[in-house]
Amino acid sequence: MKRNILFKAAVILVLICSLTACKKFLDQVPDDKQTIDDVFKKKIESEKYLAGIYTYIRSNGDWNLTSPWEGLSDEADVTYNDYPTYSMNLGNWDKNRGDYNFWIYYYQGIRRASYFMKRVPENPEIEPQLIKQYVAEARALRAYFYSCLIAQYGPVIILPDLPIPPDASIEDFSFPRNSYDECVNYIVLELDKAIADLPVSQGNTREFGRWKKGMALAVKSRTLLYAASPLYNGNTDFAGFKNLDGKVLINQTFDINKWKRAADASKELIDMPDYSLYKELDAGGNIKPYESLKNLWLKDWNSEVILCRLLDDKLYSIDKNGSPYILGGWSSWGATQQAVDAFFTANGRSIDDPVSGYTEVGTTSTANNYYAAGTSNMYVNREPRFYVNITFNLSKWINNASNNNSGTGASPITIQLYKGGNSGQYTGRNWSRTGYVVRKMVNPNSKVGPDQIADRAEIIFRLGEIYLNYAEALNEYAPGNADIKKYINLIRERAGIPQYGSAANQVPEPTNQVAWRDAIRKERRVELAFESFRYFDTRRWKIADQTDGGPFYGMDVNATTSTDFQKRVVFENRVFLKKNYLWNIIQSELNKDKNLVGNPGW
């Protein structure tokens, strides 16, 4: 608790500084009391400036207004048709659409980091070693912002390290895009420079959230994995994607060593002793999968967390949209049937495996901790991650009803998602169009009726991702390497499902690179579900034209009984065009820079 209070206090200081003095300093607009030069004469003011740069780490906690990745992926539906992802999924998306366009935002963070790096060595109150660390933090943050830009837009402009003078001419602002490989190499080089001067451990609780070596390695791992993937590694679809001078922006030659670089970066982080998969054990020392997977998101700075941030809104949107209507939630972030079907059965098989035991026929007469009697058999005997992630019809809520001031007693509420059910379609707007609700990161201690949202941090990087990054990259570079199975099995072990190659459980091991690629992608989809990865994964694998367009399925939310509700129906027909592999750069930005070319198709 003390750790959380200290960390929260630090973040509040960051937010105050970013919203007041720091932004003035960064824009070089002095107030009546001190100038930008004063900021770099006083230690506390320089630290506030650095704290302001940290606020450019974006949250993925609000799928409605500020983070589109889930609503535009094949994992989820944002129920409300007045939020942008609704119309964007229907194809209403042109070059001038500015929703979720973070181009300007990240460049602001980049420029401010560069200015800090230039000026902070002047500060006479900060000892040289600490100046090195602060410069390294700003350098790592700047590299991270660039990594976010290239994930969204592809190749971008690498700005000069020295900030552009405010009186510069329009020609001085006109830069062409760097090639994608140049962007990646720059990011990696900057991260390596930062790593040399960053501390290894979190230190005392006041240092939680400050950039460390592991955080920089996590950015490096993700950046190199994306760069090695088919979208950017020898993608001839982008042969005509060039600057005005003819420079090709996406390399046309496949390079297998890109996969090696990704694998090496991930393994370097894995080998650090500072992180481990988060596990909760029973009295006999056995892993408790459900508790481990649920509480991973609720226990701040646990052993798996590499980077997280505490929000001033306490992840309000996750708890409100992911909680059932009967308890005061909105029931409105709906998992698609495609996402539901991706989860394995309890024996570790895909639902289309004849040995999985999966069936959509009939209902169960037995109740357990996850669901009530009468639940469709399609939700019976599924893996623990399914029950952590998905609220389905007749599922039990994740806490006692009394914890939400519902007045209905202490037994967990059974959620009814059919029309007229306690959390299904009604005359208002707070219900899921898919017949499912995403519950993965919802805090069971939140009382969403009176909006008493439980405090916790938002995870940005965790070790589970790095294991999956490593296995994927290694399979592409060195198929057959024993570490591929090792790290996928570690993920499956914590998830409570049989491991590949286990004689006791008879789970068949993939037999070649292609089979392992399929297994790794399936594991990644389930383990990282609803963490804002799927949007980027389907694009970097060049499968989004297969996954993100066409009919999207859910249950029959217009049905008024559980029996009629339990059938697949199309809730939406989505449009995906080739241009959607990269985000649009809005015309106003293209107008500002005569050398800036737009993305293909826009």
Image (tube, rainbow, N blue to C red):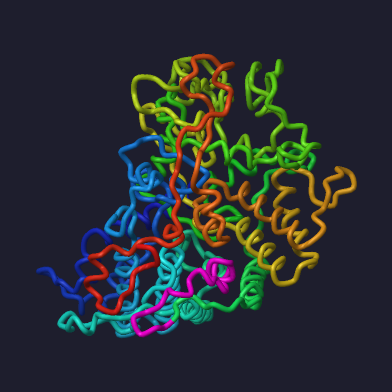
Dividing the picture into quarters, in which one does residue 217 lie?
bottom right
Does residue 197 show up?
Answer: no
Q: Residue furthest left?
A: 32
| In the image: residue 113, left or right of residue 216 | left
Main SS type for the magenta part?
loop
Q: Which residue: 44% across, 74% down? A: 240
Given residues 545 and 68, the one toward you in this image is 545
| Magenta residues, start to end | 224-247
Q: Which of 184 and 90 is in front in this view?
A: 90
Q: Residue at x 51, y 38 (%)?
A: 552
Location of residue 148 (image quadrant): bottom left
Residue at 69 percent across and 34 percent down: it is 382
Does residue 102 sit above or below 256 in this rendering?
Answer: above
Quadrant where the image shows the C terminus? bottom left
Q: Is residue 229 visible?
A: yes
Of residues 368 and 546, the one drawn nearer to the viewer in this rendering: 546
**Residue 236 inside the magenta-drawn segment:** yes
Task: Decide whether residue 82 is among the magenta residues.
Answer: no
Estimate the x, y position of residue 27 in percent, counting from the top left: 20, 71
Q: Nearer the viewer, residue 317 or 215?
A: 317
